[in-house]
Image (cartoon, rainbow, N blue to C red):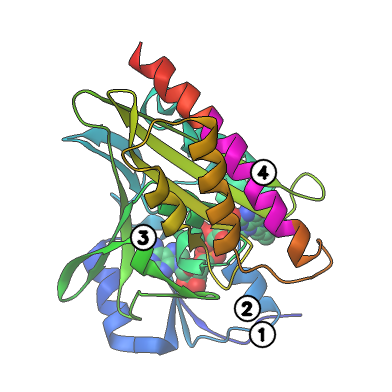
Amino acid sequence: MVPAAFEYRAPTSLPEALELLREHGDEAKVMAGGQSLIPLLKLRFAAPAVVVDIGRVPGLTGISAGGGTLRVGALTRHVDVERDTGLDALCPILREAAPQIADPLVRNRGTVGGSLCHADPAGDWGAVMLALDAELVASSPAGERVIPAAEFFQGPFTTALRPDEVLTEVRIPAAGAGQSAAGAYLKLERKVGDFATVGVAVQVRLANGEVERAGIGLTAVGPSSLKAGAAERSLAGRAPTDEAIAEAARLASEAAEPRDDIRGSAAYKKDVVRVFVQRGLRSAVARAQEAAR
Ligand SMILES: Cc1cc2nc3c(=O)[nH]c(=O)nc-3n(C[C@H](O)[C@H](O)[C@H](O)COP(=O)(O)OP(=O)(O)OC[C@H]3O[C@@H](n4cnc5c(N)ncnc54)[C@H](O)[C@@H]3O)c2cc1C
């Protein structure tokens, strides 16, 4: 199908983009890589009067570390994460998740910010950012607002962003002195390039041989990307023993709210969550212990 007619605007600065959003309100739609928006326009599930293409806005791409924070610009493409070897030491879960998203064509154009703003419950970055306790930075004509990932996803394809806001950056906290951190992303898909049947993101921070903090995010097993809070809390302050990991995996499985569909039954998906959380935690702990050596 052909999209309904819309006005196309391509601002060359953030203030210009924000002014367009202020002017047109919810009649406008931001476009980043267009990998989700363009199909929606073609199917006429979305029919905005104005499309604001932010692809020419400078300063929204790139990954940088400093001051205890890893910053990922909203327009950073999936492929940029996939190819950034520096992330292996800084935040391995990002490079593990990126190549599991879609196919090379989509990864070459789709952006981290676009994926988060699209808020598909089966989108992979949501669970990763929940596990990392990331913060999402939104800009509007009123200024900047920092939204914890745990408050960002509000339902299927629904976020805490207002129509006049642009997501500009994702901030990921780094491990502090005396701590080591690492994560893992596990995805079950029917075939390469498919959306997840189940995805699990885990991140652990170790200090003195104990789990100082654990983050667990779940993909495609609920109305949005889910944070398995009880499972996370069950590990805090404990040694990462087999028993502690098994208990966290059981709690994460309880937190999952999957549905029966063509990808599998709800009971099957819950069990995949349990198994993946167990495997993910073991890998993450091993990586964090290795990083501490
Ligand atoms: C065939 C196919 C397979 C895919 N498989 C997967 C998969 O396995 N896993 C996965 O995670 N994803 C998958 N995707 C989705 C893909 O990751 C998209 O790249 C992503 O969902 C959207 O990113 P984008 O930059 O293209 O955003 P766009 O399509 O441009 O925008 C998506 C939405 O976000 C809004 N938006 C975008 N950027 C911003 C911003 N900075 N501020 C405010 N609002 C913004 C737009 O208004 C729109 O509503 C797939 C897509 C396709 C077409």
Which stretch is magenta? 269-282
Q: Main secondary structure of the magenta part?
A: helix
Q: CA distance from mark 1 to mark 3?
A: 29 Å
Q: CA distance from mark 3 to mark 4?
A: 24 Å
Mark carried by residue 275: 4
The residue tagged with tag 4: helix, strand or loop? helix
Q: Are marks 1 and 3 in contact (CB under 8 Å)?
A: no
Q: Earlier in the sequence, mark 3 or mark 4?
A: 3
- Please state the horizontal and vertical placement of residue 196, each as a whole percent of the image: 69, 54
Q: CA distance from mark 2 to mark 1?
A: 5 Å
Q: Earlier in the sequence, mark 4 or mark 2?
A: 2
Q: Nearer the viewer, mark 4 or mark 1?
A: 4
Instruction: Provide the residue designation for mark 2.
Output: 41
- Please state the horizontal and vertical placement of residue 251, each as a whole percent of the image: 53, 55
Along the horizontal axis of the image, is 55 left or right of 292?
right
Quarter of the view holding residue 90:
top left
Query: Quick check: which quadrant has ligand 1?
Result: bottom right
Q: Nearer the viewer, mark 1 or mark 3?
A: 3
Instruction: Provide the residue designation for mark 1.
Output: 44
Mark carried by residue 97: none
**Magenta stretch containing residue 129, yes or no?**
no
